[in-house]
Amino acid sequence: MRLVMGAESEFGITAVREDGDRIPLSQLRYPLQCAIQGRVAGLRDGTDGGLFIPTGRMMWDCDHPELSTIEVESPHDVVIAMRAAEQLLLESMQDVAAAHDGRIELFRCNVDYMGGAAWAAHESYRHACPPAVLPPHLLPHLVTRVVYCGAGGLNPTDAGIEFTLSPKAWHFKAAVNGDSTVLRGIYHTRDEPLGGGAWHRLHVTCGESLCADEAMLLKLGVTALIVACVDAGLLVGDGLALANPVAALRAVAADSSCQVQLPLASGGRATAIEIQRAYLARVEAHRKDGDLPQWAGEICERWRCALDHLQAQDAWVSRTLDWGIKLQLVRQVAGDATTFRGFRRKNALWKWTRRRIQQALAQAQSYPRELVWMPERALEPNSLIPDDIDGIEARLAREGATVDEVREHVALRYRLAALDLRYGQLGPAGIYATLAAQGLVGGWRADASAIARARHQPPTGGRAAGRARAIAEVASGAHPHDGEAGWEHVLDEGGSRRAEFPDPLDDAVRWVSIGPQEKRARLRHMVRELFTSGRAE
């Protein structure tokens, strides 16, 4: 069986000049494309202003960069393609920063602890079965896989300090939904095939950008195997349905012991580890039939080992999984409140104080806008609401606390949020990158030579390889600016030809001639792109 999968990730970004002024992010899009094309062969995306390169596609989405990997047949190759694309993005951004006399930093982080926004980390899996068949078999898995592929961090919906296995988990509000921005569904119903024929594409939005290659490998490999089993007609999710998937997702995310009992639709209860073990047993039973990819054995073994280590809560978790590593770092910063029980009282005091400040601000005639997302600044000397502060101080005194104690608690939350951000920073300055360079993280790591090779050469046997060859041919030709690319085509307008790639598993490049009508349509699109990209005013 040949599976097809891929991943995409959006990145947080900060851009400042040496004098401290911000660089408008809208000014980075076109220079970034040029910088990338100076390093690898690339053609513009003919639909949304992105750029197709050997590792996949780079696009600029709502003032931040987004990477989508090529479509490949193994989870290992997805991880390698993403790491290669990240390196290319970082190096190209450094070129752009130098041209602006500034500094640009990129972050693997899917939540904004200040503004409440969330960014994407999606996966795609090709399947043949009707889309309606998948949800009952995938939902219990998507909820419980958090124990090994959660990014770790703070609960972004809680004003206090609450560690969570998955910050993004708290943004999902429905079990099944097609919305990816507001009423996010754990199982996303989008079906944009991009695979030709009767194939469908499962678009998984309930995930996070990961630094640990082992965790990313498990996330992709295990999910791909479960989808393959459903495709084969196996009822891998039978008896595992959760009574309330959204509540279960939050319960799993809130429990670093991985022992919380989840109510099942059948009336029973099971832990996330028990549900994952049930999936593993069913996948391995199918693997014995020989109808799964060659890499399935390795993934099943890594899956089993991960569940054993999670059950034992041993050092492997704190060396190998992103959330386990972050939990250790948070405990080092937070001191002796290692179980976070010590934070409960301070969390309650801060939340009460925060509500009082917000009530006072609602009645104030004017106040700095920053107090909306940083209300603790109202506690500083010369407060805008002195009478209310006096009342707050009196209430805190009755609880045996002080305003300074509350301020220190809020400051600690900011430090932990900053720790989370710096953990996923791209490049050697990132905390995870530093730990990895010092040999302090474990698990499978993508090979450096494979990453370097992937920048220019996708794996053979699929259309990604053929598309990359066609892109390189056009980009190095006489009319590189007259070319464009998509997942299923490469257009060489200067050469009056077009290559189609309808099958993800076919790497052949077949050029066909194009006529003047398609050229005129391309010209109209280029004019629109010129004005929407900011290159023309």
Image (cartoon, helix red, strand yellow):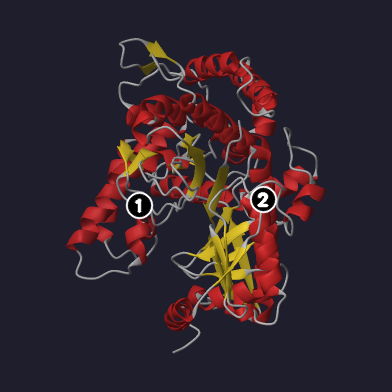
Q: CA distance from mark 2 to mark 1?
A: 26 Å
Q: Quick one: 251 or 31, which is closer to the camera?
A: 31
* Mark toward the viewer: 2 or 1: 2
Image mark for residue 81: 2
Which is nearer the N-term, disc 2 or disc 1?
2
Q: Is residue 12 visible?
A: yes
For this orientation, the residue located farthest to the bottom is 537
Which quarter of the figure has residue 359? Answer: bottom left
Q: Residue at x 62, y 52 (%)?
A: 463
Query: Closest to the observer: 526 or 173?
Result: 526
Q: Amino acid at mark 1?
A: Thr
Mark 2–mark 1 contact, CB under 8 Å?
no
Q: Between 339 and 458, which is closer to the camera in this rendering? A: 458
Query: Left of 527 or right of it: where is 330?
Result: right
Depth check, front residue: 50 or 289: 289
Disc 2 residue type? Ala
- Disc 2: CA contacts within 10 A as few (<14), some (14-19) or many (>=20): many
Assign the C terminus to one quadrant of the image. Answer: bottom left
- Relative vertical location of residue 279 with respect to residue 362 in this rendering, above or below: above
Q: Name the quadrant of the N terminus.
A: top right
Reply above or below: 532 against 510.
Answer: below
Q: Secondary structure at mark 1?
A: loop
Q: Which mark is residue 181?
A: 1
Taking the image as shown, residue 470 lies to the left or right of residue 255, namely: right
Q: Position of residue 219 (x, y in %)?
A: 57, 34
Q: Position of residue 67 (x, y in %)?
A: 57, 57
Image position, residue 424 (x, y; %)? 61, 50
Q: Is residue 411 left or right of residue 36?
A: left
Other residues around mark 1 within 10 Å, as few (<14) / some (14–19) / many (≥20): few
Name the residue located 49 percent from the left edge and 46 percent from the top edge: 122
Residue at disc 2, secondary structure: helix
